[in-house]
Amino acid sequence: MFDIALEAADHAGHALEMIDFGGGFGVPYFEKTSEFDLDRFGEGLREVVSSYRSDPRLEGCRFLFELGRYLVADAGVYVTRVVDVKETRGKTFAVTDGGMNHHLTATGNMGQVFRKAYPLLNLTRMDGAVPEEGVAVAGPCCTPLDSFGNNIPLAAPEVGDLIGVFYSGAYGYSASNLGFLSHPSPAEVLLIGGEAVLLRAGGRPEDVLNGQKALTL
């Protein structure tokens, strides 16, 4: 990347002010995935930067990483409620009151960068038995795209159970297709000092009419 940046500086005819390395620090969505080794990465980065730092084309240059997801992903949990449970050919299917309309990335619909690997937990039955074939969890949006996964190691759900989708602090509310087919938006709640504070109230189906003006004929 430094070589490409320096080549760009030569074409531009002046020193670089900033090099943006982009994002991409790993978040351990999968159970057996190790956390990103920030110390080891920092050591390697310092070594690379030091080898280029004396180049006059980089004098005063700032280096930037876009670390939004890495910093806040594990600070958020999306919580949805089970509204229906079905058993078909030994397979358990759970339908929740929110899905791709609330958390698009957790349903795997944000392209190749985000896979359907978000860890799910039945918050109502933390120690419940997990069906042998796992659980298929789908949202309410009447499309096969609205699925959190088909073989999730989730304690057997019942109607009314709360399902938590972890690592949801990034690319959740603001990255989802809110209002899809008039489904209401989710509430946002902040937990601080052991207290729950409502930051944004949940929506209502009639919200789809907000902003409309009556037409007089």
Image: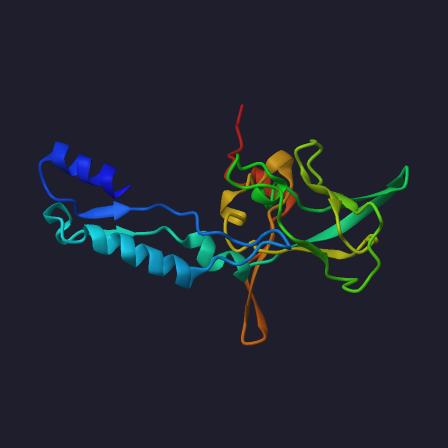
Out of 18 and 85, give the one closest to the viewer: 18
The location of residue 210, given as percent across then percent down, is 54, 41
Q: Residue at x 13, y 32 (%)?
A: 11
Q: Is residue 95 left or right of residue 111?
A: right
Would residue 9 appear left or right of 197 to someone viewing this image? left
The image shows residue 8 at horizontal and vertical percentages of 19, 35
Report the residue at 29% width, 46% height from top.
20
In the image, residue 192 above or below residue 181: below
Specify the quadrant that holds the C terminus: top right
Q: Can residue 199 be seen from the camera position used here?
A: no
Find the residue positioned furthest to the top: 217
Residue 46 as seen in the image, left or right of residue 195? left
Task: Residue at the far right: name it.
Answer: 89
Total marks placed: 0
Q: Quadrant of residue 107?
A: top right
Residue at position x 71%, y 47% in the image = 97
- Quarter of the image holding residue 101? top right
Q: Nearer the viewer, residue 185 or 172?
A: 172
| Residue at 57% across, 38% down | 209
